[in-house]
Image: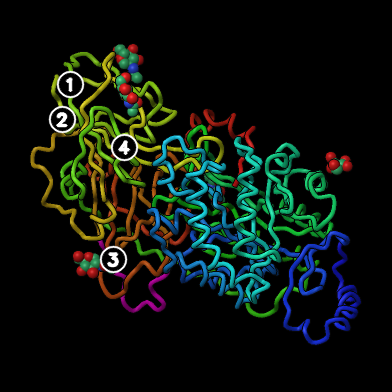
Amino acid sequence: MCLLRAGNTILLLLPLLLLFGQSLSVSRSFSIDYQNDCFRKDGDVFRYISGSIHYFRIPRIYWKDRLLKMYMAGLNAIQTYIPWNFHEESPGVYNFEGDRDFEHFLQLANDIGLLVILRPGPYVCSEWDMGGLPAWLLKKKNIVLRSSDPDYLAAVDRWMGKLLPRVKPYLYQSGGPIISVQVENEYGSYFACDYNYLRHLTKLFRSYLGNDVVLFTTDGGGISYLKCGTIQDVYATVDFGPNGNISAGFAVQRYAEPHGPLINSEFYTGWLDHWGWPHSVVATSQLTKSLNTILAMGANVNMYMFIGGTTFGYWNGANTPYAPQPTSYDFNAPLSEAGDLTEKYYAVREVIKKYRKIPEGPMPPSTPKYAYGSVTMKKLQTITDALDKLSLSGPVKSKYPLTFLDLNQAFGFVLYRTFLPLACITPIPLSSPLNGVHDRAYVSINGVAVGILERNKVLSINVTGNAGSQLDILVENMGRINYGKDINDFKGLVTNLTLGEYVLTDWTMYSLSIDEAINQGIIDEDGAAPEDPPQPAALSLPTFYRGSFIIPDGIPDLPQDTYIKLPSWRKGQIWINGFNLGRYWPARGPQVTLFVPAHLLSTAVPNNLTVLELENAPCSSGPCTVEFTDSPIINATVLPNYKQSWSLFDKGIMLGL
Ligand SMILES: *[C@@H]1O[C@H](CO)[C@@H](O)[C@H](O)[C@H]1NC(C)=O
Ligand SMILES: *[C@@H]1O[C@H](CO)[C@@H](O)[C@H](O)[C@H]1NC(C)=O
Ligand SMILES: *[C@@H]1O[C@H](CO)[C@@H](O)[C@H](O)[C@H]1NC(C)=O
Ligand SMILES: *[C@@H]1O[C@H](CO)[C@@H](O)[C@H](O)[C@H]1NC(C)=O
Ligand SMILES: *[C@@H]1O[C@H](CO)[C@@H](O)[C@H](O)[C@H]1NC(C)=O
């Protein structure tokens, strides 16, 4: 056990100083001391108290503010993942700019005085689409991800060959903030158990980062996870939350590492949410009690998350049985989604204070929020009306349905069209017998919305219509599974649909470039087909809406952060000035408001909102508005039937983050 006292440090340092003289002041080292069960930084006993922050969930302009707040809480380190698919969206096309400029993020951490624990994957889980693996890996349909499948390894090698040379200058030994680097992520929870893969990664990391860097693995706090998750010469750590027996958690680590520092790499400050499940909360008292126990043991800890942030756009992941995560990744963490200081933050700071001198000086304040009020929305075209403009690559025909990937589309929506092969005078089931709607399908016949199919939930609806009627199925990708054996998550109609006894064939598929169309402002009011038939009250065709608002003059310090709420809207996607803010689904909850960071807003020109409502906008029955408020709602009550259908999952299954 390490004794973290100043006196101890000086005693240990003196002989080293005598040995190396001046050279010690320039040689930076970070290593594991197996004899004394601790880390050594520049020869001194060292323990980290760290927090997770994902640069990819926070706008770049707020990186510094959030890091400073973490520093002021008394942390001496932060931890982040690097999601591969965020940086290599198409094979060989890399993006390290703007919000993806992780080097700038590392530099900021360094400047503020925070060390960094880096988790570059290649798989990261993280409630992120496909756990950070690029969907294009699935072009080889039977690829075994996270294994020594040669095609997988070739892609990993190419990516790491781009990434790790950028990481290297930021290693502690090179004068940067990175003290340790994780290999893979909770690999022991994955079925493949391929030691050759872990060995390959270790060699790869060493070849780029050198032999001095501390490499580690992380696995769930159970001995069974360590079996496939740990590998020789890579330090094994564990993760567990504040509810269990802390000593038992570390005893699991000791099983793999009889000596060396105790490390909880993910100590859960809160927990993730799923659409339709009650909002997760971890009590502050429970968290601080367990944090105190961990720190009193002299263990190293990383709080996951210290700030969760937002999963903008289409980037969220999902768990199995299919349960996608919402846009907010607040996580009930000490800093809120918007970076606000919570009572949990102050309570954690009080605990840390007992073990470490915490920085003095003024606390950076929570950013102010502004309620801009209601914005009237105007109906634009439906997806069907705008099809030509949205389908830049034009339709593709195929006897059987193709997946998103076959159509070269990663995210968003694809329209599948065919014609009823028979007259459905009485209701006939339109079904996905193999549960192949990935993930939600908005069905219309001759321009009339008739129902919704949903993965794992609604596999069949009854339809009527004349033979030859046009059947349109808009399929939404709600986020790829990020954990477990089902991460090879193909999107679209991944199996055949049937109408009664018939397999539906002869599809025309429209890959939709909705984000591009919105950015180019090419969805308009005038293009609505005059013959759009009247819709049944409960549903309407997926439709775009637009509104704009001006930020008032004469109020100082605007624009400020805000939240957007869509009262009585049901489900869809929302863009602000062309930025894809994320998914809204107040009809299912628990998230009701979406965080809107100020930098997206303009004070000089009107701000433009675009909404794609998939089910039914409130516009025919009442005020067609959305509303900007100054406080978040992410914990609305969810329908009990959803709660029930997930209760088994809720209780039993250990989720890797
Ligand atoms: C916690 O775990 C330790 C080590 O496994 C064990 O000795 C102790 O009895 C446990 N405490 C409780 C309250 O279960
Ligand atoms: C479809 O209609 C049949 C016959 O009316 C009925 O038995 C069945 O429950 C309906 N299925 C659905 C999914 O509504
Ligand atoms: C659809 O059914 C046909 C005929 O049974 C089969 O050959 C094809 O593979 C199926 N397609 C999908 C995507 O399941
Ligand atoms: C909003 O749209 C209007 C009209 O197209 C345009 O003039 C304005 O610049 C847009 N606002 C922003 C912030 O892009
Ligand atoms: C949601 O959270 C707020 C703020 O913490 C709390 O006041 C409110 O009671 C919660 N609502 C529900 C339905 O849990």
419 or 281: nearer the eye?
419
Asked if one can make out residue 634 in the rendered structure from this viewpoint, the answer is: no
Q: Which residue is mark 3?
A: 607
Q: Residue at x 40, y 57 (%)?
A: 92
Q: Which mark is residue 120?
A: none
CA distance for labels 3 and 4:
29 Å
CA distance for labels 1 and 3:
43 Å
Say whether residue 14 is left or right of residue 520: right
Q: Which mark is residue 465?
A: 1
In terms of image quarters, where does ligand 4 lie? bottom left
Q: Earlier in the sequence, mark 4 or mark 2?
A: 2
Q: Position of residue 644 (x, y in %)?
A: 54, 29
Q: Nearer the viewer, mark 3 or mark 2?
A: 2
CA distance for labels 4 and 2:
17 Å
Q: Earlier in the sequence, mark 3 or mark 4?
A: 4
Q: Are marks 3 and 4 in contact (CB under 8 Å)?
A: no
Q: Which residue is mark 4?
A: 475
Q: Are marks 3 and 2 in contact (CB under 8 Å)?
A: no
Name the amino acid, label 2: Asn
Characterize the local packing of mark 2: few (<14), some (14-19) or many (20 or more) Cα atoms within 10 angstroms: some
Q: Which residue is mark 2?
A: 446
543 or 341: nearer the eye?
543
**Numbered disc 3: secondary structure:** strand
In magenta, the rendered stretch is 548-560
Q: Are marks 2 and 1 in contact (CB under 8 Å)?
A: yes
Name the amino acid, label 1: Gly
Q: Earlier in the sequence, mark 4 or mark 1?
A: 1
Q: Position of residue 327 (x, y in %)?
A: 45, 50
Say whether residue 648 is left or right of residue 592: right
